[in-house]
């Protein structure tokens, strides 16, 4: 490992770089975890807004429960250091979720 600090991406705002450079390692790990979760959330929001063209039906997945719409996507949530799959979809302004199962079936 180098003694030099890492080079930030050029498209990262200066104030963000300055704040991160002043942060403790623990805070940086929390920021990294939050940033990853926020990116996943925003990507999921974008996917949920996309709907198939009018008149085009999506194929229903064999493992999709009857009470989960076909537009639902699968997301992973971490709870108490365990990872779980959830179906997620949008109903109006709300995001709905339904438990699917553990990421690692041995859990």
Image (tube, grey):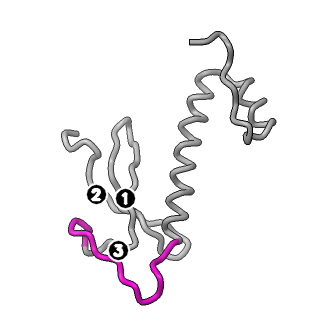
Looking at the image, the residue that sits furthest to the right is 14
**Residue at x 26%, y 69% (from the top left corner):** 61
Whether label 1 touches label 2, CB < 8 Å: yes
Crowd tier of the residue under label 1, counting other residues whose Cα lies within 10 Å: few below 14, some 14–19, many 20 or above: some
Q: Quadrant of the C terminus?
A: top left
Q: Is residue 47 left or right of residue 12?
A: left
Percent x, y for residue 97? 39, 62
Q: Is residue 9 magenta?
A: no
Q: Is residue 53 magenta?
A: yes
Residue receiving disc 1 = 74
The residue segment tinted magenta is 50-65
**Residue at x 57%, y 49% (from the top left corner):** 38
Nearer the observer, disc 1 or disc 2?
A: 1
Q: Earlier in the sequence, mark 1 or mark 2?
A: 1
Residue receiving disc 2 = 100
**Residue at x 33%, y 48% (from the top left corner):** 84
Note whether 101 is above or below 17 in the view shown: below
């Amino acid at each position: 490992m180098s003694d030099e600090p890492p080079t930030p991406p050029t498209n990262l705002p200066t104030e963000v770089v300055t704040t991160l450079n002043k942060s403790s390692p623990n805070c940086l790990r929390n920021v990294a975890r939050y940033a990853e979760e926020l990116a996943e959330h925003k990507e999921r929001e974008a996917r949920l807004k996309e709907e198939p063209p009018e008149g085009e039906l999506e194929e229903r997945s064999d493992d999709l429960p009857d009470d989960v719409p076909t537009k639902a996507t699968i997301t992973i949530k971490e709870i108490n250091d365990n990872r779980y799959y959830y179906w997620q979809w949008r109903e109006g302004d709300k995001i709905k979720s339904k438990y699917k199962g553990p990421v690692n079936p041995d859990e």
